[in-house]
Amino acid sequence: MDPYEIQSEFLKAFAHPTRLAILDILKDGEQCVCHMEATLGLRQAYISQQLMPLKNAGLVESRRDGLNLYYRVVKPEIFDVLAALQAAAGVRPTLPQHRHANNVCPCPKCSAKAETTLIHIEAL
């Protein structure tokens, strides 16, 4: 494949606001789809639809753990590209703070973090 075509495919994968927000979420490491859903306030099906171009471009990969599907970035260099894009556009986006009714993502990873925080607060 032509090198310019490869670069073009990468740029196409970035070319949607939700995909950029997903990559912003994944800067913190592996995240489950339900965490993305809770953070962005979007339906799981829509998030999965937006994850497909990122996965097809080889930028993210997934793993299943029980009922939960986790995604992670496999090419961390893309964060440099995103930082350059933000600098060129003169913007620094911040993620929305939508949450489930209980104020946390219901996945085991997020639930464990919430429990640890609660235990730490109660210990104080």
Image (cartoon, rainbow, N blue to C red):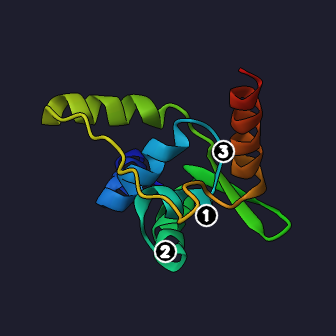
Q: Which mark is residue 49?
A: 2
Q: Which mark is residue 34?
A: 1
* Sequence order check, earlier mark of 3 and 2: 3
Nearest the camera: 122 or 77?
A: 122
Disc 1 versus disc 2: nearer the observer: 1
Residue at the image point whose x is 72% and y is 59% from the top? 107
Disc 3 versus disc 2: nearer the observer: 3
Residue at the image point whose x is 55% and y is 49% from the top? 59
Q: Whole-Å distance between the Cαs marked 3 and 1? A: 12 Å
User: What x and y, as percent, mark residue 118?
Assistant: 71, 37
Nearest the camera: 120 or 59?
A: 120
What's under tag 2, amino acid-wise?
Gln
Classify mark 2: helix, strand or loop.
helix
Q: Is residue 9 visible?
A: yes
User: What is the crowding at mark 1: few (fewer than 14 residues within 10 Å), some, or many (at least 20)?
Assistant: many
Dots 3, 1 in contact, CB < 8 A: no
Q: Is residue 2 visible?
A: no
In the image: residue 10, left or right of residue 71 = left
Residue at the image point whose x is 42% and y is 65% from the top? 41
Residue beneath disc 3: 30
User: What x and y, as percent, mark residue 71?
Assistant: 65, 54
What's under tag 3, amino acid-wise?
Glu
